């Protein structure tokens, strides 16, 4: 069956490397579904991780391994998709350099996530570096080096993709039609809150990780922020403002009306509600964690997957870079 198009997407090996439920529900589940219909390139973007975690790279290799384990355990298949590490395909960096010569500085400064991320990490590290400012340009190089025509994104990433399209247009205007203009594939992503009620994110230390064992899952669920007005069991709850209920909307769809009714009528206590959610999460992640444990004992296989992925990716990337250099007469 002919493929619908070529996809490029990636994830950073930051923090502890392991991926959280936001990554699973917001991206990975969609990636797995797209494997049969698209030619997929999924990249662990270790160069991107340097834009904010440049001061300590001691855990990068281990983090790459953790990301790959999560990818494979949720169902990404190296027989269907090309899985690789960004730094093992140097054409990414070369194209990034060439594109930096034609990209106006204001284009990078106006990206909404630039100032937002600086504010989020204020006081934790200095992000006034070219690498951080140029993050969206490197992201554009990642996409264009494979001539990806489809990029799965959430709405918050649309400005990055539009920048990529502008850079491709500018290059094509100067040197001839080399790059296709990548189209967004908006992915369905439920809103996944962290245990404290904010957006789930490693920098907030509020994550539930795919690899969290049952006892850790239960402990994190028990620590979740709930309705402060529900003090006694008989007090009516306000589920629409409760973090625990937001997870039930994802994992207890068949019983969500019942849970809402019992909570608002004062017939469901927070302890029981959290216990039910813990059981749902443990059951949902059970098979994934089993596969992960099996893969952890096969380090040679993990290396083989990344090496083969890099070979496949470089074949495509080299062809594109040669075309770019020929168009630029260099």
Image: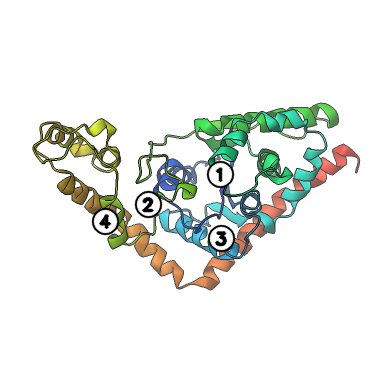
Residue 119: image quadrant is top right
Q: What distance separates the C-alpha of mark 2 from that of mark 3?
A: 19 Å
Disc 4 target residue: 218
Residue 154: give x, y in percent of width and height.
50, 34
Left or right? Give the position of 291 relative to 138: left
> Which circle's residue, 3 or 4, is located before the other in the chain?
3
Q: Are marks 3 and 4 in contact (CB under 8 Å)?
A: no
Farthest residue toward the front?
123
Residue found at x 18% / y 44%:
270
Disc 1 designates what residue?
Answer: 121
Local SS, label 1 = loop
Q: Earlier in the sequence, mark 2 or mark 3?
A: 3
| Count of numbered badges drawn on the protein | 4
- Of badges 2 and 3, nearer the viewer stands 2
> In the rendered structure, which disc, 2 or 1, sits on the residue that comes first in sequence?
1
Q: How is the image coloured?
A: rainbow
Residue 217: x and y in percent read 30, 56
Q: Quadrant of residue 248?
A: top left
Quarter of the picture containing the C terminus is top right
Residue 32 visible, this angle: no
Of mark 1 and mark 4, the one earlier in the sequence is: 1
Q: Say whether disc 1 or disc 3 marks the residue closer to the N-terminus.
A: 3
Disc on res. 221: none
Q: Which residue is mark 2?
A: 208
* 133 or 303: nearer the viewer: 133
Front label number (2 vs 1): 1
Q: CA distance from mark 2 to mark 1?
A: 20 Å
| Secondary-structure class at tag 2 | loop
Secondary element under disc 4, as helix, strand or loop, is helix
- Determine the CA span between mark 2 and mark 4: 10 Å
Residue at numbered disc 3: 64
Discs 2, 1 touching: Cβ within 8 Å: no
């Amino acid at each position: 069956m002919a493929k619908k198009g070529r996809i490029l997407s990636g994830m950073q090996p930051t923090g502890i490397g392991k991926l959280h439920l936001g990554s699973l529900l917001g991206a990975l589940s969609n990636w797995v579904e797209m494997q049969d219909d698209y030619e997929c390139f999924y990249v662990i973007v270790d160069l991107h991780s340097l834009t904010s975690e440049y001061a300590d790279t001691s855990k990068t290799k281990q983090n790459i391994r953790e990301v790959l384990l999560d990818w494979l355990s949720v169902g990404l298949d190296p027989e269907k998709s090309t899985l690789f590490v960004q730094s093992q395909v140097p054409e990414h960096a070369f194209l990034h350099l060439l594109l930096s010569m034609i990209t106006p500085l204001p284009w990078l400064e106006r990206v909404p996530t630039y100032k937002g991320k600086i504010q989020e990490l204020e006081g934790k590290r200095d992000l006034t570096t070219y690498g951080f400012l140029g993050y969206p340009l490197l992201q554009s190089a990642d996409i264009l080096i494979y001539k990806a025509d489809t990029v799965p994104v959430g709405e918050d990433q649309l400005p990055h993709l539009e920048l990529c399209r502008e850079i491709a247009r500018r290059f094509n205007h100067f040197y001839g039609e080399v790059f296709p203009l990548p189209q967004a594939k908006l992915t369905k992503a439920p809103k996944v809150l962290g245990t404290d009620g904010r957006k789930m994110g490693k920098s907030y230390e509020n994550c539930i990780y795919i690899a969290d064992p049952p006892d850790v899952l239960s402990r994190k669920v028990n620590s979740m922020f709930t309705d402060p007005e529900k003090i006694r069991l008989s007090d009516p709850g306000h589920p629409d403002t409760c973090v625990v209920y937001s997870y039930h909307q994802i994992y207890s769809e068949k019983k969500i009306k019942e849970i809402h009714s019992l909570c608002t009528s004062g017939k469901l206590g927070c302890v029981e509600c959290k216990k039910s959610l813990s059981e749902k999460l443990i059951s949902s992640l059970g098979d994934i964690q089993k596969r992960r444990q099996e893969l952890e004992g096969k380090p040679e296989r993990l290396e083989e997957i990344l090496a083969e992925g890099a070979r496949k990716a470089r074949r495509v990337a080299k062809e594109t870079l040669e075309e770019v250099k020929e168009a630029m007469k260099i």
